Amino acid sequence: MFRGNHPAKVDEKGRLKLPSAFKQLVDAANIGQFYVTSLDGESAQVWPLPEWEKREAQLAESSEMEEAVQKYLSLTSYYGQQVEMDSQARILLPQILRSSAGLDDEDAAVIGMGAYIAVHNRKRFEQAVVGNKLTAEDKAKLAEITRRKS
Protein backbone atom coordinates (compact mmCIF):
# COMPACT_ATOMS: atom_id res chain seq x y z
CA MET A 1 0.00 0.00 0.00
CA PHE A 2 1.68 3.18 -1.24
CA ARG A 3 1.24 6.27 0.95
CA GLY A 4 2.63 9.77 1.27
CA ASN A 5 4.55 12.30 -0.82
CA HIS A 6 8.13 11.50 -1.74
CA PRO A 7 9.68 14.24 -3.91
CA ALA A 8 12.02 12.93 -6.61
CA LYS A 9 13.57 13.96 -9.91
CA VAL A 10 13.06 12.55 -13.37
CA ASP A 11 16.52 12.37 -14.95
CA GLU A 12 17.55 13.53 -18.44
CA LYS A 13 16.85 10.02 -19.82
CA GLY A 14 13.29 10.00 -18.46
CA ARG A 15 13.93 7.67 -15.55
CA LEU A 16 12.33 8.06 -12.15
CA LYS A 17 14.24 6.70 -9.18
CA LEU A 18 11.71 4.98 -6.98
CA PRO A 19 11.71 6.62 -3.53
CA SER A 20 13.21 4.34 -0.88
CA ALA A 21 9.92 4.00 1.05
CA PHE A 22 8.24 2.67 -2.10
CA LYS A 23 11.26 0.58 -3.10
CA GLN A 24 11.07 -1.26 0.22
CA LEU A 25 7.44 -2.16 -0.49
CA VAL A 26 8.08 -3.47 -4.00
CA ASP A 27 11.16 -5.38 -2.84
CA ALA A 28 9.14 -7.02 -0.05
CA ALA A 29 6.53 -8.06 -2.62
CA ASN A 30 9.26 -9.16 -5.08
CA ILE A 31 7.98 -6.82 -7.81
CA GLY A 32 10.26 -5.65 -10.62
CA GLN A 33 7.78 -5.05 -13.45
CA PHE A 34 5.43 -2.07 -13.66
CA TYR A 35 2.80 -0.64 -15.96
CA VAL A 36 3.23 3.13 -16.35
CA THR A 37 0.21 4.96 -17.75
CA SER A 38 -2.15 7.92 -17.41
CA LEU A 39 -5.83 8.75 -17.76
CA ASP A 40 -5.30 12.33 -18.88
CA GLY A 41 -1.64 12.89 -19.76
CA GLU A 42 -1.31 15.30 -16.82
CA SER A 43 0.40 12.83 -14.49
CA ALA A 44 1.79 9.31 -14.58
CA GLN A 45 0.40 6.30 -12.76
CA VAL A 46 2.98 3.65 -11.86
CA TRP A 47 1.24 0.34 -11.19
CA PRO A 48 3.03 -2.78 -9.94
CA LEU A 49 2.32 -5.18 -12.80
CA PRO A 50 0.35 -7.66 -10.64
CA GLU A 51 -1.99 -4.84 -9.51
CA TRP A 52 -2.45 -3.64 -13.09
CA GLU A 53 -3.24 -7.19 -14.21
CA LYS A 54 -5.94 -7.40 -11.50
CA ARG A 55 -7.45 -4.18 -12.86
CA GLU A 56 -7.39 -5.53 -16.42
CA ALA A 57 -9.11 -8.73 -15.27
CA GLN A 58 -11.84 -6.72 -13.52
CA LEU A 59 -12.42 -4.69 -16.67
CA ALA A 60 -12.47 -7.78 -18.87
CA GLU A 61 -15.35 -9.15 -16.77
CA SER A 62 -17.36 -5.97 -17.17
CA SER A 63 -19.85 -5.95 -20.02
CA GLU A 64 -22.35 -3.41 -18.74
CA MET A 65 -20.16 -0.34 -19.35
CA GLU A 66 -18.39 -1.36 -22.53
CA GLU A 67 -17.94 2.17 -23.86
CA ALA A 68 -16.38 3.42 -20.61
CA VAL A 69 -14.08 0.38 -20.50
CA GLN A 70 -13.00 0.96 -24.10
CA LYS A 71 -12.23 4.63 -23.39
CA TYR A 72 -10.26 3.68 -20.29
CA LEU A 73 -8.26 1.02 -22.12
CA SER A 74 -7.62 3.33 -25.08
CA LEU A 75 -6.25 6.08 -22.84
CA THR A 76 -4.18 3.79 -20.65
CA SER A 77 -2.75 2.03 -23.71
CA TYR A 78 -1.98 5.29 -25.50
CA TYR A 79 0.03 6.62 -22.56
CA GLY A 80 1.12 3.25 -21.21
CA GLN A 81 4.12 0.96 -21.33
CA GLN A 82 5.22 -2.04 -19.34
CA VAL A 83 8.63 -1.32 -17.79
CA GLU A 84 11.17 -3.06 -15.61
CA MET A 85 12.88 -1.49 -12.62
CA ASP A 86 16.64 -1.41 -13.11
CA SER A 87 19.30 -2.32 -10.54
CA GLN A 88 19.34 1.29 -9.27
CA ALA A 89 15.55 1.29 -8.62
CA ARG A 90 14.79 3.45 -11.67
CA ILE A 91 11.82 3.08 -13.97
CA LEU A 92 11.52 4.64 -17.40
CA LEU A 93 8.53 6.90 -17.94
CA PRO A 94 7.14 6.69 -21.52
CA GLN A 95 8.24 9.63 -23.69
CA ILE A 96 4.73 10.62 -24.77
CA LEU A 97 3.64 10.73 -21.14
CA ARG A 98 6.73 12.61 -19.95
CA SER A 99 6.12 15.29 -22.56
CA SER A 100 2.40 15.73 -21.90
CA ALA A 101 2.78 15.68 -18.09
CA GLY A 102 5.80 18.02 -18.01
CA LEU A 103 8.06 15.39 -16.46
CA ASP A 104 11.10 15.72 -18.75
CA ASP A 105 14.14 16.32 -16.50
CA GLU A 106 11.94 17.87 -13.81
CA ASP A 107 11.26 17.71 -10.09
CA ALA A 108 8.35 15.41 -9.39
CA ALA A 109 5.85 14.88 -6.61
CA VAL A 110 5.68 11.11 -6.17
CA ILE A 111 2.44 10.40 -4.33
CA GLY A 112 1.28 7.08 -2.89
CA MET A 113 -2.27 6.34 -3.99
CA GLY A 114 -2.80 2.95 -2.37
CA ALA A 115 -2.42 0.40 -5.16
CA TYR A 116 -0.32 2.65 -7.41
CA ILE A 117 2.05 5.62 -7.38
CA ALA A 118 1.11 8.94 -9.01
CA VAL A 119 3.91 11.06 -10.49
CA HIS A 120 3.21 14.76 -11.03
CA ASN A 121 5.21 17.74 -12.19
CA ARG A 122 5.93 19.17 -8.73
CA LYS A 123 5.28 22.84 -9.55
CA ARG A 124 1.95 22.11 -11.29
CA PHE A 125 0.87 19.74 -8.54
CA GLU A 126 1.63 22.20 -5.74
CA GLN A 127 -0.38 24.91 -7.53
CA ALA A 128 -3.31 22.52 -7.99
CA VAL A 129 -3.26 21.30 -4.37
CA VAL A 130 -3.21 24.84 -2.96
CA GLY A 131 -6.29 25.72 -5.01
CA ASN A 132 -8.18 22.50 -4.33
CA LYS A 133 -9.25 22.62 -0.69
CA LEU A 134 -11.75 20.17 0.76
CA THR A 135 -15.23 21.71 0.74
CA ALA A 136 -17.87 21.17 3.42
CA GLU A 137 -19.64 18.86 0.94
CA ASP A 138 -16.42 16.85 0.44
CA LYS A 139 -15.99 16.49 4.19
CA ALA A 140 -19.60 15.34 4.61
CA LYS A 141 -19.17 12.69 1.89
CA LEU A 142 -15.94 11.46 3.47
CA ALA A 143 -17.61 11.24 6.88
CA GLU A 144 -20.45 9.22 5.35
CA ILE A 145 -18.03 6.82 3.65
CA THR A 146 -16.03 6.26 6.83
CA ARG A 147 -19.22 5.68 8.85
CA ARG A 148 -20.39 3.03 6.36
CA LYS A 149 -17.04 1.24 6.44
CA SER A 150 -16.79 1.02 10.23
Image: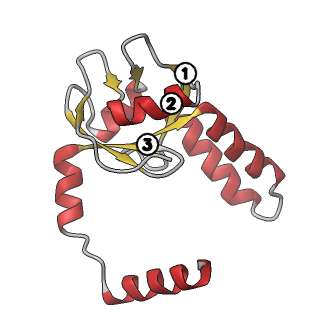
Front-lying residue, 123 or 102: 123
Residues under numbered marks 3 and 1 in contact, where contact means CB atoms less than 8 Å apart: no
Position in image of residue 87 (x %, y %): 42, 10
Using the image as rendered, state which of residue 135 and residue 32 is in the foreground: 32
The percent position of residue 95, horizontal first and vertical second, equals: 38, 25
Tell me if mark 2 has few (under 14), some (14-19) or many (20+) residues whose alpha carbon lies within 10 angstroms of its own. Answer: some
**Discs 2, 1 touching: Cβ within 8 Å:** yes
Which residue is pictured at 24% across the width and 20% down the height?
11
Establish if 147 lies above or below 75: below
Q: Is residue 93 visible?
A: yes
Q: Which residue is mark 2?
A: 26
Looking at the rendered image, the disc whose residue lies closer to the viewer, 2 or 1, is 2
According to the picture, the residue beneath numbered tag 3 turns out to be 117
Which of the two discs, 3 and 1, labels the residue nearer the N terminus? 1
Where is 58 relative to 134, above or below?
A: above
Q: CA distance from mark 3 to mark 1?
A: 14 Å
* Residue for badge 1: 32
Indicate the amino acid at tag 1.
Gly
